[in-house]
Image: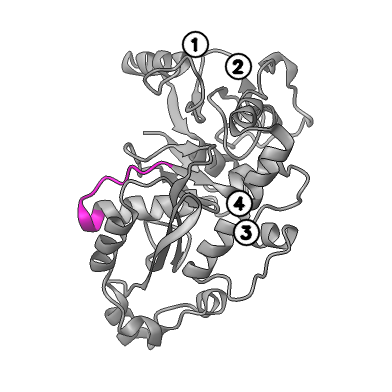
Amino acid sequence: MAIYFDLLTGETFKYKTIRENKGKSLLDAPNSYCVIDIETTGLSPNCDSIIEVAAIRYQNHQIVDTFSSLIKPDDFDEEFSENGWYLYDFITELTGITDDMLKNAEKTGKVLSKYRDFIGNNILVGHNVNFDINFLYDNFKYYLNYNFTNNFIDTMRISRRIIPDLPHHRLQDLVKFFNIDYSNAHRAAKDCLLTAECYFKLIEMIKLQYGTIEAFKDAVTYKYKGIKASDISALTDSFDTSHPIYGKVCVFTGTLEKMLRKDAMQIVANLGGINADNVTKKTNYLILGNNDYCKTIKDGKSAKQKKAETLKLKGQDIEIIPENVFYDMIIID
């Protein structure tokens, strides 16, 4: 297992959470779906707890049902008794959720069981929804022994592609851009409604700019075509030689969700890494993007990934990492 480094703390850690059955991130506009949002005590599925979940079920873009519930984490009573409080002040200030509100809420497993039944097999829509999906995946597995495989659509991912000049792509930035009322935000149910409104606006923009969703997908999915490793060179000659990317040969496959491939390759070069177009025995990292829309792929794995897996089985020093681990390594906000 590869060792990764937290550049903020200087600590090393092992990337342990492999969500093998996680659904795919889609660029699409289905008629039926669930918009979801959760509130948590922090940013780490391994260390933090879910304290609220919400979902709105849509058919033909019309609301047909809603779900919303606070959650009392398993360690609530113990932590509250010991500290006199459970939620940090900034979480209460951000979400409006207080300890008193959680005291009488149902426990995590019971709420998540209802939430799973409400969501069903629907495609999920959310803003920066990968965050929510990771929490739900891990908690569904722990509490329900359930593989959370729903595919999902991220409005942040769409926003980055359809409004590239927007300085930031947080939900509050989209709401402001579309002139939508942002009051009572940061509660899960309200954020679901705001996300849905932004989703509708983004789909309208896609149709105005590209005509069809398929044309949009083709345009943004294949923007990296023609970019070769030889086209990228470092913009600095000062490198941190202790960085895990420094001196390592990196290859990308698939479409990255947060940035264009050329931008990711530029970051690798600026960190002293070595970009390459193809997987060879010299490759140290293969970074996996999204292969959903590559028409030549039938089993979800590109030729690069298959070759990397073969080399790894033969003992080659090569790591196959998902996109989010790559961002952890380079510390991208």
Dot 2 falls on a residue whose secondary structure is loop
From mark 3 to mark 2, how far is it between C-alphas? 35 Å
Residue 295 vertical placement versus 220 (above, below): above
The residue singled out by tag 1 in the image is 280
Q: What amino acid does circle 3 point to?
A: Leu
Decide: few, some or many residues near mark 1? Use Cα within 10 Å; few <14, some 14-19, many ≥20. some
Q: Which amino acid does label 4 sit on?
A: Phe
Quarter where residue 161 is shown: top right
Element at badge 3?
helix
Q: Which residue is labeled 3 in the image?
A: 171
Q: Do the residues labelled 1 and 2 touch (CB within 8 Å)?
A: yes
Magenta residues span: 142-151
Q: Against 209, is 121 above or below?
A: below
The residue under the point 53% across, 38% down is 28
The residue labelled by disc 4 is 200
Label 1 – label 3 distance at C-alpha: 41 Å
Q: Distance between the residues labelled 1 and 4?
A: 44 Å
Q: Is residue 331 visible?
A: no
Q: How crowded is mark 3: few (under 14 residues within 10 Å), some or many (20 or more)?
A: many
Sequence order check, earlier mark of 2 and 4: 4
